[in-house]
Image (spheres, helix red, strand yellow):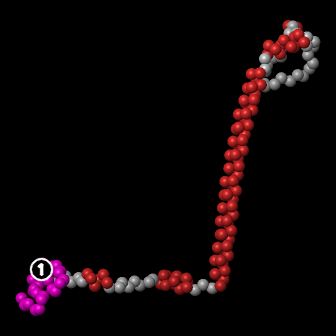
Amino acid sequence: MAQTGKSRQYRSTGKSEYRRSDSRSAYVAGNTVRKLDVVEEIHKPRKQELSHAVKKNRDKAVYMNLGYVLFLSASLLVAGFVLIGYIRLQSEITASVKHIAAMESTLNSLKVSNDEEYSRIESSVDLDEIRRIAITELGMTYPNQDQIVTIPDEGSDYVRQLADIDD
């Protein structure tokens, strides 16, 4: 064992040893283990080789002719007009839905007021008064049995008269 400066050097015996030199520490297992310098590994710039396809795509991206620029501009304008039209249609649909909701609300309020008026009219009609006026003032009478004609119901909603009824 020889000692030089601040570092101690050990001979390699094939066994694991702890070696110290300057301020770095390393664990060595045998004589084939390489020394790692982590700080240098971190700061070392990494080179990545680009594939042929990547280089080709980058070259194409740099080169744009007038036709390509015009095509991209035209497609951007078309997409803009389509999106503006779509947004306009959506706003018209929203306005229509709001208008329909307002009209349905008005319809419901009119139905309610119509039902209330119908109930008021129904309750104001006095059937006994109508019968009294019909009999006394207009001279109406109840029908006799020979004046009543019954027509058989065949399950339909209405009856058709195909011939005159004998009096």
- Residue 128: image quadrant is top right
Residue sitting at x 17%, y 84%: 23
Q: Quick one: which residue is furthest to the bottom in this view?
A: 4
**148 in relation to 87, above or below:** above
What quarter of the picture does the C terminus occupy? top right
| Kind of element beneath mark 1 | strand
Residue 149 pos. (x, y %): 86, 13
**161 in relation to 72, above or below:** above
Q: Is 77 included in the stretch rendered in magenta? A: no
Q: Mark 1 — residue? A: 17
- Give the left or right position of residue 13, taking residue 139 as reference: left
Residue sitting at x 29%, y 83%: 41
Residue sitting at x 23%, y 82%: 36
Q: Is 4 included in the stretch rendered in magenta? A: yes
Q: Disc 1 residue type? A: Glu
- Give the left or right position of residue 33, taking residue 154 as reference: left
Residue 54 pos. (x, y %): 48, 82
- Give the left or right position of residue 80, taking residue 161 as reference: left
Residue 53 pos. (x, y %): 49, 82
Which segment did they paint magenta? Answer: 1-30
